[in-house]
Image (cartoon, rainbow, N blue to C red):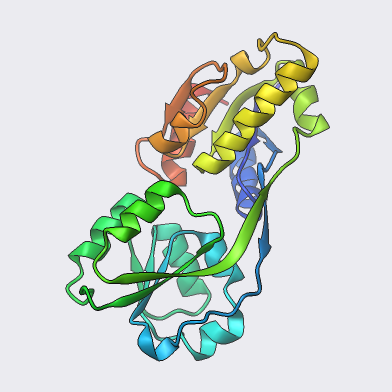
Amino acid sequence: MKPIVVITRTRPDADALAQRLTDLGYEPLLEPMLRVSATHAATVHDPMCVEALVVTSAQALRHLNTLVREVAFRHKPLYAVGPKTASLAIELGWDNVHDGGGDVRALGTFLKSRSEITPSSRLLHICGRDIARDTREILNDVPGNVLDWVVYETEPSEEFSPDFIEAMRTGRVKAALFYSARAASVFADHVRAYSAKNSPDNSHFGAIKFLCLSKAVVESLSNIPSNGTYAATSPDEDALVALLKVQVPA
């Protein structure tokens, strides 16, 4: 029987990952911890006064106002958090795209290395409504004035789905994949709520390995039972899938 691997990532990224895991011999179970929706908010910042765009998630690109993107910001330099976000930007028609290195910390270092970014630069950060504290701290350390354009927002799921609970109770869930600290925090909250409501016995969760995109994500899962919590060697999907192959062979 194929091991079930829970994907906590938001859609549509979760769908592509599910197909990848299926091809590798796993049985994916989609259990998004966050729901994403567009804000439909136009930017208040004058495109003529913005030197470049900074994008810290693929979701931000998907929810960016298309008309504004094509007309007002189309030829601005776009600094993407990593290769997948950069590839998506190119796919969506941006023609001056820079890969920041894989995570927000690498992106911050990359931005500070760019000679064209000076203390007088105005950078427009395309983002969600909830910005992680470490992301804010890193961008605050970048030369210039980083301005937010909130194009999407996320809401946590209310509880675990019946499909997840059934799979967990049967012991078939062998791993859960986590891409963000916020999603991991929501998952941890659900574990505590489920345990308080049903039983103090957390043995079902103790059989699951938690595989995380980074050490920051690991920290959000530190206070709940597991069969081990691990961080990928680099903050990208290939490294996370490689970790899965080692920890839970198909």
- Up-down relation of residue 227 to residue 95 (above or below): above
Q: Is residue 93 left or right of residue 16?
A: left
Residue occupying image coordinates x 59% and y 46%: 17
Residue 225 point in image, percent of width and height: 57, 16
The C terminus is located in which quarter? Answer: top right
Quadrant housing residue 119: bottom left
Q: Is residue 175 left or right of residue 113?
A: right
Is residue 175 visible to the viewer in this orientation of the structure?
Answer: yes
Residue furthest to the right in view is 162
Residue occupying image coordinates x 64% and y 54%: 154
Residue sitting nearer the eye, 106 or 97: 106
Residue 65 point in image, percent of width and height: 60, 78
Is residue 102 visible to the viewer in this orientation of the structure?
Answer: no
Quadrant housing residue 4: top right
Residue sitting nearer the eye, 124 or 100: 124
Q: Is residue 240 left or right of residue 204?
A: left
The N terminus is located in which quarter? Answer: top right
- Up-down relation of residue 75 to residue 236 (above or below): below
- Up-down relation of residue 235 to residue 167 (above or below): below
Residue 14 point in image, percent of width and height: 63, 48
Residue occupying image coordinates x 78% and y 34%: 161
Quadrant housing residue 166: top right
Q: How many marks?
A: 0
Residue 93 point in image, percent of width and height: 50, 80
Residue occupying image coordinates x 56% and y 60%: 129
